[in-house]
Image (cartoon, rainbow, N blue to C red):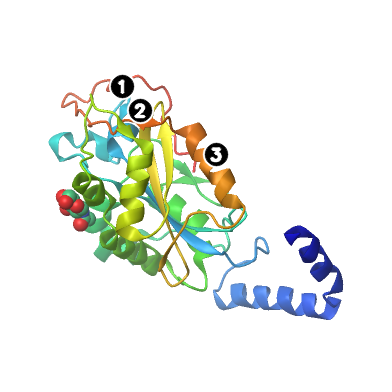
Amino acid sequence: MASFSAQIRIITVPWLFLAIIVGSLCAIDEVNGSIVEAHQREFDYFALALQWPGTYCRRTRYCCSSNACCRGSNAPAEFTIHGLWPDYNDGTYPSCCSRSDFDPKEISTLTEALEQYWPSLSCGSSSTCHGTRGSFWAHEVEKHGTCSFPVIRDEYNYFLTGLNVYFKYNVTKVLNEAGYFPSNREKYPLGGIISAIENAFHTSPQVICSHGAVEEIRLCFYKDFEPRDCAVGSDIKIDMVTSRKSCPRYVSLPLHVSSESGGPQGWFADDNEAL
Ligand SMILES: *[C@@H]1O[C@H](CO)[C@@H](O)[C@H](O)[C@H]1NC(C)=O
């Protein structure tokens, strides 16, 4: 039904109207002082992707200064930020929406907070938008941040907004209060973890697992940052299936065991940041 009526609408939209839409998208990019790379429509909602260090850090095979897993006893012990991602309701997302290169100077006043709450959990460099590789932060803001327009208009506000939303919705706290603590022995019901978050934030999260361990939890928000479910309408069914596929019914929340020597720390071979 939905796709049928959508088709009708596309057919009946006058070409002049389409031209106006495309024209105004170009104008937005010009205002931004950037080169148009692709015409991607405005996003539908935000996902705040949170990383569980206990799972990510098992992939660390060697250490480097950029990898927070390598901070020994100061390694992060709570969910940290992966990214604030503009998404579409159909499960796809826009990326690399304007040409603006990451500038560390713009966020110098946030660096300390970002090192603590939005650190890289890998030594690898990440792809940026222009065929080069760069830091974790460069990747997040160039690939995702540029698509948050017009809600978020620049690099500084992208990171500031991510931090603010993260502070407001403390998933680690919610899980602890529900009795789910990091452990290398316990397994917890996936449904219990999802319910704890639903009860606290009135929104249904997406949970991503790796080898039976929670790797990421994603919280979703409307453009005004009111919480919403991570999938809408018919997508909910698909999303539940995806979550089930990725996560078993009982999942672990592994404790990061730091290795002071910086030697091999786990069994996982990949050290990449795919997203
Ligand atoms: C989240 O809650 C945990 C557990 O109560 C706490 O240790 C941590 O400092 C909180 N994190 C933030 C960013 O407020």
Q: Residue at x 47, y 70 (%)?
A: 223
N-terminal-most mark, 1 or 2: 2
Respond yes or no on whether mark 3 lies under 8 Å from ligand 1: no
Residue 266 circle label: 1
Real-space Cα separation, disc 3 to disc 1, in angstroms: 29 Å
Crowd band around label 3 with a 10 angstrom C-alpha radius: few (<14), some (14–19), many (20+):
few
Q: Quadrant of the N terminus?
A: bottom right
SS for tag 1? loop
Q: Amino acid at mark 3?
A: Val
Residue 144 image label: none
Q: Position of residue 114 (x, y in %)?
A: 28, 55
Question: 239 left or right of 156?
Answer: right
- Closer to the observer: label 3 or label 1? 3
Quadrant position of residue 108: bottom left
For the residue with label 2, is its CB less than 8 Å from the closest atom of ligand 1? no
Identified by mark 1, the residue type is Gly
Q: Which residue is mark 3?
A: 241
Residue at horizontal 13 percent and vertical 36 percent from the top: 73
Q: Are marks 1 and 2 in contact (CB under 8 Å)?
A: yes
Vertical position of residue 104 compared to residue 181: above or below:
below
Q: Residue at x 27, y 23 (%)?
A: 265
Does 161 sit above or below residue 256?
Answer: below
